[in-house]
Image: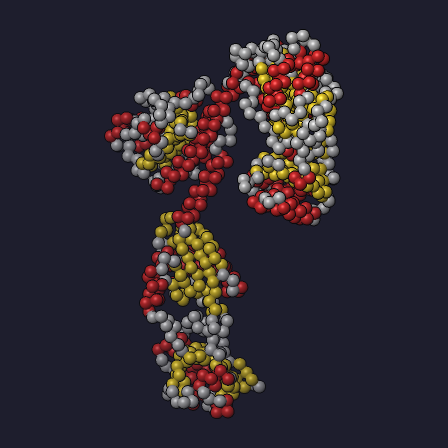
Amino acid sequence: MDSPREDLDAQAPVGARDLLDASSDAAAVVSAAGTVVGWTRAAEALLGHPPAEVTGRPAARLLAMRADPARAAGVAQRCRSGMGWSGLVPLRHRDGRSVLVDLRVSASFRIDDEECFLLSAREQRPQWPMGQSVLDGFLTRSPIGMAVMDLELRYVWLNDTLEQFGGVPREQRLGRRLSELLPGLQATTLETLMREVLKTREPVTDYEYLGWSWSDPHRQHAYSTSFFPLVGPDDSVTGVCYLVSDVTERWAARQLLSLVNEAGTRIGTTLDVLRTAQELADFAVPRFADFVIVDLLEPVLSTEGHGTWLTDAGPAPARPAMRRAALRTVREGHPEVVAQVGDKVDFLPPPHGLDLLIKGEAILIPELDPEDLLWVTEQPARAARIREFGLHSLISVPMRARNTALGLTTFARSLNPAPFQADDVLLAQELVARAAVCVDNARRYTREHTAAVTLQRSLLPQALTGGTALDVASSYLPADATDGVGGDWFDVIPLSGARVGLVVGDVVGHGLTAAASMGRLRTAVQTLADMELPPDELLAHLDDLVLRLGEEENSGTASEGSTATFVGATCLYAVYDPVTRRCAMARAGHPPPVVVAPDGQVRFPEMPAGPPLGLGGMAFEATEIELAENSLIGLYTDGLIEGADRDVELGMARLRAALAVPDTDLDTLCASAVQQLVPVPQPDDIALLLARTHALGIDHVVSWDVPVDPAAVGEVRAKAVHQVLTWGYDELVTTTELIVSELVTNAIRYAEPPITLRLLRDSRLTCEVADGSSTAPRLRHARSTDEGGRGLFLVAQLAHRWGARHTADGKIIWAEQEIPAT
C-alpha cells in the first residue's frame, strides 16, 4: 500500500478525488485484527472467492503485493479518527491474476463490541476510453466554460475557456470554491444554486447574472450559466457540473430594447413640438449622453402652412435656418452650449453640409478633436467649448419623419469616459426616429388646430359607415353652392357594444360663418358621444357649450380674428342598439325623425321638441322606440321639408311619400328623395341622413349573470373562453381571458350587484361587464410597490379600445378587440 497514487489519496478527503466514479458494489467487513468477518456477493464476483474461503481468515491473504503492517496500522489509525481512506490497491483473484481496485475504507465502527472497518472496492477502469484528444478538445477548443465541482463545491476540473473568463489560473482554482476566488461574480448566489442542484438533482439552465472578472476588471459582463448534477452508476450524486458562456452582447441588446421601449413612453407625451424635443433631450441625459441639443428647422416650429422645409425631391436653401428647440447637459446651467433654446442656429458637424439633413445618415465621431482645422475654422466657438469641457465623442442624427426633414439632434459625452461605438449610433437613431414621429405628429396637430376655425375643419364627413348595425346614405346641399359649405351637418358615430350614434344639426345661417360654427358643434358632438352619454345628456352638454361660446363672443373673449358667432342651432341625436333593436333619441328644437317600417308604413315618432341649443336653463327629454329589422330611419334638416311654400306639414307629407318606396337602394333612395323635395336651389342648407337597421342575432351575443363571489371569476372566465373558441377566435382566447378576469374581478370587488358579463361579436369582439354601481372607473398608473391598481391599465393595453357608459341601473365597462382577418 505504498504506491504514489495511494500516498496522494491518503492525504485527500474521501469524495474530493475522482468524482466521476461511484462507490463499488463489492464490500467486506474486516475486524481490527485484520480478519474478514463479512463478505458480499459483489466481493465474490470481483475476486472469485466464495464467503467460506474468506471469512474468518486474514484479509492480507487477498493482497497481490507485499504486506506492510506499519502502513496498514496508519490507515487504521486514520479511519479511527473518522476521516476514512481510499486508494488504488492490487488484489489477488481466485484464479491467480492481479486485479487493480479502487479500495475505500470507512471510519471504524463496532459489531458486538468488536472494532470493524467496512471496505468497498471496484475494479479500476480507464475514465476516458475515447482518448486524450477528446479531453484536449474540451480544454482548448470549447467556446463554453465548463467546470466540475465536488460535493463541497470545490473545483476539481475546468477547461481553458472558463479559465480565460475568470482570469484566475487553473492551479489557483483547483481545490478552492468560487466564493474564495471571484466574489464579484455573485458567487454566493451561484453556490446556493449549485447546492440546490445537489439536493434536488434538478438542473438549472440559463441563469443570467452580471459581474466582473480579473480578465477584464474594468467592464461589467453578463454571463449565462447552467448547472446539472453528476450521478454515478449507483445513482448517487458525486458532484455538480456547470457551463458558463459570456452573453454580454445579448444582454446589451436586451437592455437596448428595454431602453427603446421606455423611450416610447417618455418621449411624445404631448402634442407639442418643443415639449417633445425637450423630452428627447431629458431622456437621453444622462442615460446615454452627457450633452444633447435638438435643433429644428424654422418651418417646423411655424404654425402657418405645412411647416415643412424640404423633402428628397424638393428644393432647399443653401444653409438651413434652424432654431434651438431643446437642450440638456449633466452640468448645471448648461455651460457647454453656445446657443440657448429659441436662438437661431446653423450647426452642422464639419465637414458635413446640407446633405446631412437631406440623406438622413447619422454621423459618428468616436474621438472628437477640438484642434481639428475644420472645427476651428467653421465652428470656432464650439471648438473652444469642446476643449474647455472635455467633450470627446459625438453623434449627430438628422431628424426625419414621413420623408420630411425636421432638424438635427446631437449627442456628446464628456464626463462619461467611454466613447460612442457603432451600436450607440443605432440607439441614437432609434431615439431620434421615435421623437421625429412625435414631433411630426405634434407639428401636424398644431397646424390642424390652428386651422380649426377654417373651412377645411368644417367639412362634412366624406365617408360614413354604420358598421354591422346600419346601412347609411347621406345627401348634403349647401345654400351657397359657390363655396360648397354651410351650417347643416350630420354624422354617424360608432359606439361601444355595436351601437351607432346618428346626429344631424342645423346652425342658423349659411356660408363660412355658419360652417365654422358647424365644425365646432360637430366636433363637440363627436367628443360627447365618445363619452357614452345618453341623447338627452349629450344635448344638455352641447347646450352648455353653445351658451358658453355665445357668452365669450358677446364679452369679446373669443379668439382674435374669429368670425363665428353662435346665433342659434338645432340638433337631433339618436343611438341605435342592434342587440335590442331599440333606438333612443332626443332633439333640441329639431324636426322629428322619419321611420319607414319594413312593410312600407311611414311615421314620425312623437317626441318632446326640446329648446334650441344656446337658450340654457331648459331640460331635454329622451324617447326610445323599437325598430324592426330592415326599418328605415331618416334624419334631416328643416331645409328639406320647408320647400318654397314654407309649409312644414306639407313638406313632411312629401318626405313620407318620397321614402315609401319598397326595395330601393339606399343611396338611390336618398338622392331621389332630395331631388323630389328640393328640385331647385333653396335659400337654406339641406341635409338628409338615411339608415337601414339590422339586428344582431342571438348567435352573436351571449351573457351570464355573475355571483358576487371572487370564486365565480374562474367559472365565468372559463365560459367566456369556451364561447370565444366556439366562435372560432382562437387567437383572442388569451387576451379575452385576461380582460374578463380584470373586469369581472373589479366589478365583484368594487361595484354592486347585479353583475352581468356579455360577449358580443360584430366587426369587433366586445366584452362588457355591467354592474349596479354608478361610480365611474379610473385608469391608474400603479407604482412598482403597489399591490393593485393595474387592472384597467392592463385592459387598456390589451384592448383595441375600452371605456364605460352609464345606464339607468348602473354602468357598463367595455373593451373591444380587433377580430383577426381570416
Location of residue 790 with respect to 692 vertically, above or below: below
Q: Looking at the figure, which quarter contains the C terminus?
A: top right
Hey, which residue is sitting farthest top in the picture? 645
In terms of depth relative to the viewer, which is nearer, 657 or 57? 657
Residue 547, picture quadrant: top right
Residue 295: horizontal and vertical position, in percent? 39, 26
Hey, which residue is sitting farthest left in the picture? 373
Kindly tell me whether residue 108 is visible in this rendering.
yes
Q: Which scheme is used to colour this image of the protein?
A: secondary structure
Kindly tell me whether residue 532 is visible in this rendering.
no
- The residue shown at (52%, 11%) is 482
Residue 345: horizontal and vertical position, in percent? 36, 23
Residue 185: horizontal and vertical position, in percent? 43, 54
- The residue shown at (49%, 22%) is 446
In terms of depth relative to the viewer, which is nearer, 60 or 477? 477
Horizontal arrangement in the rendering, residue 80 relative to residue 296 (left or right): right
Residue 594: horizontal and vertical position, in percent? 69, 21
Horizontal arrangement in the rendering, residue 297 relative to residue 477 (left or right): left
Location of residue 132 with respect to 680 vertically, above or below: below
